[in-house]
Amino acid sequence: MKQFMYLCLLTLLACSSAPTQLIVGKDVCSFCKMTVSDNRFGGALRSPKGKTYLFDDAECLHNFIKEHKEFDFNKCSLWLVDFSNPHYLMDIHQAYLVKSIHYKGPMSGDIIAFSSKVTALNYIKVQGGEEIGANTFLP
C-alpha cells in the first residue's frame, strides 16, 4: 500500500501544470531571446496545447501576451517568479503585483511579484511603488 501511495504521488507531481523553475544562465527568454540572468524576475506561460514559454522579465511576458493574440489566455497557465523567493514560480492569479520604482527587471520592466500580500505591502511601504492587479497586466 505504501508503494502504491508513493507511485500515486509521483504521478501527480509528474502531471503538475506548473513549469519547472527558471535556470539562470541556461534558459532563454521566448520574447527577447536573452538568457535568463536574474532569478528574482521572470515568468512562464503554458499554452492550451502544452507548450511552455519562458521569460526573463515580467515585461517580456506582458509583451509576448500583447503580440500573440492567437492564444486564448483564459486557457493558458501563466506564472511569475516570486521576488521574495527567487526561482519560485507562482500562478499569476495568486500573485500580488507591484509596480516598483526601485527595481528593474533585466529588460527594464518595473513589475515584480510576491506570493504574499503582506510581503508586497511591506515592500511598498519600505521601497515605494504601487500594487496593481493581474487584470491590469493581462489582456
Image: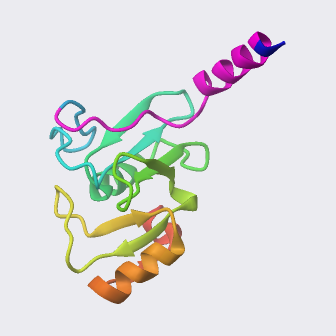
Residue 84 placement (x, y as % from top left): 37, 62
Kindly indicate the quadrant of the structure image that contains residue 93: bottom right
Quadrant of the frame with the N terminus: top right
Figure check: 2 above or below 89: above
Near-viewer residue (67 or 39): 39
- In this rendering, does residue 24 appear at all? yes
Q: Residue at x 52, y 74 (%)?
A: 117
Kindly indicate the quadrant of the structure image that contains residue 2: top right
Tell me, yes or no, whether the highlighted magenta stretch contains residue 20: yes
Residue 52 placement (x, y as % from top left): 43, 32
In the displayed orientation, state which residue is furthest to the front: 2
Q: Residue at x 70, y 14 (%)?
A: 7
Report whether 84 appears left or right of 96.
left
Residue 98 placement (x, y as % from top left): 38, 74
Question: What is the magenta range?
Answer: 3-25
Q: Residue at x 41, y 82 (%)?
A: 122
Figure check: 11 above or below 109: above
Residue 97 placement (x, y as % from top left): 43, 70
- In this rendering, does residue 128 appear at all? no
In the displayed orientation, state which residue is furthest to the right: 1
Q: Residue at x 37, y 36 (%)?
A: 53
Report whether 106 appears left or right of 136.
left
Tell me, yes or no, whether the highlighted magenta stretch contains residue 90: no
Number of numbered discs present? 0
